[in-house]
Image: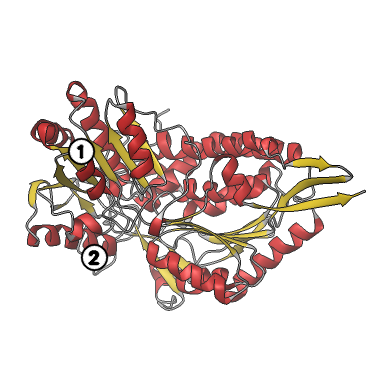
């Protein structure tokens, strides 16, 4: 029997978006919509989701209501208060979450397809990066759960010890570029610590969140513990951020919206905040590794153009020391030129489509700004049409002008460190190349940013790597010397700096972020 193509599987998949509250689905939006039904839908009450791949209408999702948020929060609060999850032993919760890992693995093709359709990323990326990373993050939370130890001590007749408990009801708002991974980033530590959760996925990538919550219930997470509410940021996101019964708000998205989350927390109940916001990560290459330029170029390309550059940790500023600039840049251009936008449903594709038309136009505007401000375009810079031999997934809108949203990998040389494309987060396939003379200048250029999420460096010098770790404004620094890092590994927990956010969500520190501590003093 012939194995169905990914396109055939996409057409056979019902793309319906519904809220998941108290252990079951609640109708939200109209899912797959026939031509006859479209006329019944008000633009103000629904959000159209168009396919990044071909521009066709994938599904429609309701803009959401404050009432739906209230219902989800109440469900989470009831579940937390009666102890159906929070009252379990950590070993019991671990066993359930391990079963969730098993179910994600068992349903990995379905979940990968949803990610591919929603985001426009290649199906191979979803299968071999997104799903393994999501499973790895869950496993990390499971492994660290029993390693949380509170300090204890005694002095004469006094005994003191710490008690660490779940924080309560967690509100989580995530971005659209890695929907499943970002959902797990929030859900794994929240659930491992015994919290209840209300998750709001981006309205631009709504497919996988409800399925993850459904699998969690199938794994044994009690009804009401993991809830999902869909809708716009203006309605659902705002209501969740301001809700007086949310104890912790964890947000991943833009810096602009992150600042709004801080205001909302202060105006409501001063809820705890975890923020991972924008980035403009430098990739610094020093001239002490001339024998590894092919490997370094490959890693530069990977970090700049992974997920079509729609990645907050993208190494979008390449800082190269003068002595190796020409050799390295030639290799980077050569390797990046091999990345051709292709049909995301093609299993051989390595570079897909951008999320939607609005973002597509935004990235093109940044490319034009780079040209206007004097940078030299050395690769790409164009929107392209991709041959979709097997046609569209859904119906094409009458006013559609494009068959998907594809932009070539783009590289600018001779970029002014103060220019727009070197300062602002483009969130697309655009790499800015900047030359430096020495360590001091490299650090100064790298730190010339309001962001501080991630940094990369290539050097053979341990002393230099240690200095970079001290002096760079970045929550995480990845240093490569002689081998390409394994990107599937979950790194040690890191905390964003500057306007990239605050708080840790991975590893032991991530679990601590989702808990509260009480010190008990007993005076005998």
Q: Toward the viewer: 245 or 54?
A: 245
Which image quarter: residue 149? top right
Q: From the viewer's side, name the closer residue of 473 and 202.
A: 473
Which residue is nearer to you in this view: 385 or 502?
502
Looking at the rendered structure, which numbered label has been put on residue 400? 2
Q: Quadrant of residue 215?
A: top right
| Label tally | 2
Relative image position of residue 303 (x, y in whole percent): 29, 40
> SS class of the residue under badge 1?
loop
Residue 302: x, y in percent?
28, 37
**Neighbour class for label 1 at 10 Å: few (<14), some, many (≥20)?**
some
Q: In the displayed orientation, state which residue is furthest to the right.
A: 524
Q: Residue at x 71, y 43 (%)?
A: 220
- Is disc 2 surrounded by few (<14), some (14 to 19) or many (20+) residues within 10 Å? few
> Percent x, y for residue 426?
26, 56
Residue topped by disc 1: 339
Residue 37 visible at all: no
Q: How is the image coloured?
A: secondary structure
Q: Would residue 481 be found to the left or right of residue 191 on screen?
A: left
Q: Quadrant location of the N terminus?
A: top left
Residue 362: horizontal and vertical position, in percent?
23, 63
Residue 502 seen by the camera: yes
Spot the residue most to the front: 156
Relative to residue 40, is residue 481 drawn left or right? left
In this rendering, would 236 be left or right of 255? Answer: right
Residue placed most toward the observer, 455 or 127: 455
Query: From the viewer's perspective, is residue 266 above or below residue 374?
Result: below
Q: Earlier in the sequence, mark 2 or mark 1?
A: 1
Q: Secondary structure at mark 2?
A: loop
Compared with 514, 66 (above or below) is below
Q: CA distance from mark 2 to mark 1?
A: 26 Å
């Amino acid at each position: 029997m012939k194995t169905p193509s990914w396109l055939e599987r996409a057409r056979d998949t019902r793309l319906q978006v519904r809220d998941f509250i108290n252990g079951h689905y609640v109708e939200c939006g109209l899912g797959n919509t026939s031509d006859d039904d479209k006329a019944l839908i008000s633009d103000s009450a629904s959000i159209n989701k168009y396919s990044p791949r071909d521009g066709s209408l994938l599904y429609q999702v309701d803009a959401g209501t404050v009432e739906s948020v209230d219902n989800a929060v109440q469900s989470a609060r009831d579940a937390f208060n009666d102890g159906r999850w929070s009252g379990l032993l950590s070993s019991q919760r671990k066993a359930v979450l391990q079963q969730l890992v098993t179910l994600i693995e068992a349903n990995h093709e379905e979940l990968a397809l949803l990610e591919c359709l929603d985001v426009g990323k290649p199906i191979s990326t979803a299968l071999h990066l997104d799903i393994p990373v999501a499973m790895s993050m869950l496993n990390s939370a499971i492994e660290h759960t029993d390693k949380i130890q509170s300090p204890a001590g005694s002095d004469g007749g006094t005994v003191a010890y710490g008690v660490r408990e779940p924080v309560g009801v967690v509100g989580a708002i995530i971005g659209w570029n890695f929907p499943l991974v970002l959902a797990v980033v929030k859900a794994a530590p929240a659930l491992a610590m015994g919290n209840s959760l209300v998750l709001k996925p981006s309205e631009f990538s709504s497919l996988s969140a409800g399925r993850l919550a459904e699998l969690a219930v199938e794994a044994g997470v009690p009804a009401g513990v993991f809830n999902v509410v869909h809708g716009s940021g203006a309605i659902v996101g705002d209501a969740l951020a301001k809700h007086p019964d949310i104890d912790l708000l964890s947000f991943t998205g833009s810096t602009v919206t992150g600042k709004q989350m801080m205001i909302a927390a202060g105006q409501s109940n001063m809820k705890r905040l975890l923020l991972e916001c924008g980035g403009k990560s430098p990739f610094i290459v020093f001239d002490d590794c001339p024998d590894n330029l092919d490997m370094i170029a490959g890693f530069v390309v990977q970090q700049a153009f992974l997920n079509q550059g729609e990645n907050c940790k993208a190494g979008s500023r390449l800082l190269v020391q003068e002595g190796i600039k020409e050799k390295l840049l030639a290799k980077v251009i050569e390797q990046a030129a091999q990345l051709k936008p292709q049909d995301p449903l093609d299993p051989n594709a390595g570079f897909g489509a951008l999320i939607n038309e609005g973002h597509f136009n935004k990235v093109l505007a940044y490319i034009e700004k780079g040209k206007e401000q004097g940078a030299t375009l050395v690769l790409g810079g164009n929107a392209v049409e991709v041959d979709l031999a097997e046609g569209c997934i859904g119906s094409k809108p009458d006013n559609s002008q494009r068959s998907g949203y594809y932009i070539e990998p783009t590289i600018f040389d001779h970029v002014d460190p103060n220019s727009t494309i070197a300062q602002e987060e483009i969130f697309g396939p655009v790499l800015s190349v900047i030359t430096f003379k020495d360590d001091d200048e490299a650090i100064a250029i790298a730190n010339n940013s309001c962001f501080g999420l991630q940094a990369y460096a290539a050097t053979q010098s341990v002393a230099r790597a240690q200095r970079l770790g001290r002096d760079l404004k970045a929550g995480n620094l990845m240093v490569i010397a002689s081998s390409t890092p394994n990107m599937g590994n979950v790194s040690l927990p890191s905390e964003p700096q500057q306007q990239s956010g605050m708080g840790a969500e991975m590893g032991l520190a991530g679990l601590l972020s989702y808990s509260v501590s009480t010190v008990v003093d007993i005076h005998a």
